[in-house]
Amino acid sequence: MRFFLRYFVYLQLVLSPSLVQGQGHVLDKPVTELCLTCICEAISGCNATAICTSPEKGTCGIFRITWGYWVDAGKLTVNGENPDSDNAFINCANDPHCAADLVQNYMKKFNQDCNDDGQMDCHDYARIHKLGAYGCQADMPYKFQSVFEECIEKYEDKGFQ
C-alpha cells in the first residue's frame, strides 16, 4: 500500500502547476489526480528513469507518450520551448508536468464513453490512453487492466478521489 501512496503523493507534487506552454493548453482538466496516478502506474509503473532520447524509440516518459499523441494533444512544451524544435516532444513527454498536461489535453479532445456504461470517467480515460481515441472499445491488455483496477480500488478504499 505504501508503494501506491508514495506514487500518489509524488504525482500530486509533480503534477502541480508548471511552466508548460503550447497550442491549446487546457485549464479545465477532466482527469483527476487519482486517475492520472493509476494510468501512470498501469502504463509504466510510474518509472521516471525510463525516459527516451528520440521519438524513434516509441514511447516516452511516465505516461509513455508517442509523438502522435503529443501532436494530437497540442504540442505542449516545457519552459516556452518552440514546438518545432528537435527536442520539444522528448522534453515534454519526459517531463511529468508537461506529460500530465498532454494527457489532460488528449482526454479533453477525445473524451468518449469507451465502455458504454453511460458515463465518461477514469475507466474511459485509461482505455483512451492505452488503446487510442479510435480503438478504446477494444479489449484492454490484461496486465494494464489488472494494475489499473488494483490501483483504483486501493485508492478508493483509502478515500482518495
Image (cartoon, helix red, strand yellow):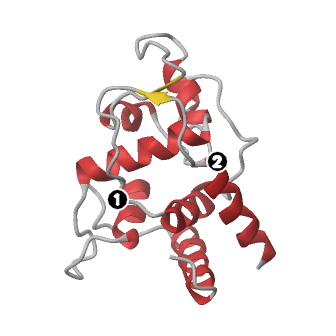
Q: Nearer the viewer, residue 56 or 160?
A: 160
Residue 27 in percent (x, y) is at 35, 45
Is disc 1 in contact with disc 2, using a CB cutoff of under 8 Å? Answer: no
Q: Residue furthest bottom?
A: 157
Q: Residues within 10 Å of mark 1 (few under 14, many from 20)?
A: some
Q: Residues within 10 Å of mark 2 (few under 14, many from 20)?
A: some
Q: Which mark is residue 14?
A: 2
Q: Nearer the viewer, residue 153 or 17?
A: 17
Reply above or below: 149 against 126: below
Disc 1 residue type (three-letter): Pro
Q: Which residue is mark 1?
A: 30
Going by the image, does 48 lie left or right of 92? right
Q: Residue furthest right?
A: 2
Q: Which mark is residue 58?
A: none
Going by the image, does 115 lie left or right of 60? left
Disc 2 residue type (three-letter): Val
Residue 108 in percent (x, y) is at 28, 51
Residue 93 in percent (x, y) is at 54, 34
Query: In the picture, residue 131 is in which quadrant?
Result: bottom left
Q: Considering only order in the chain, which callout, 2 or 1, is on the residue closer to the N terminus?
A: 2
x 29%, y 33%: residue: 24
x 53%, y 73%: residue: 142
Residue 75 in percent (x, y) is at 38, 27
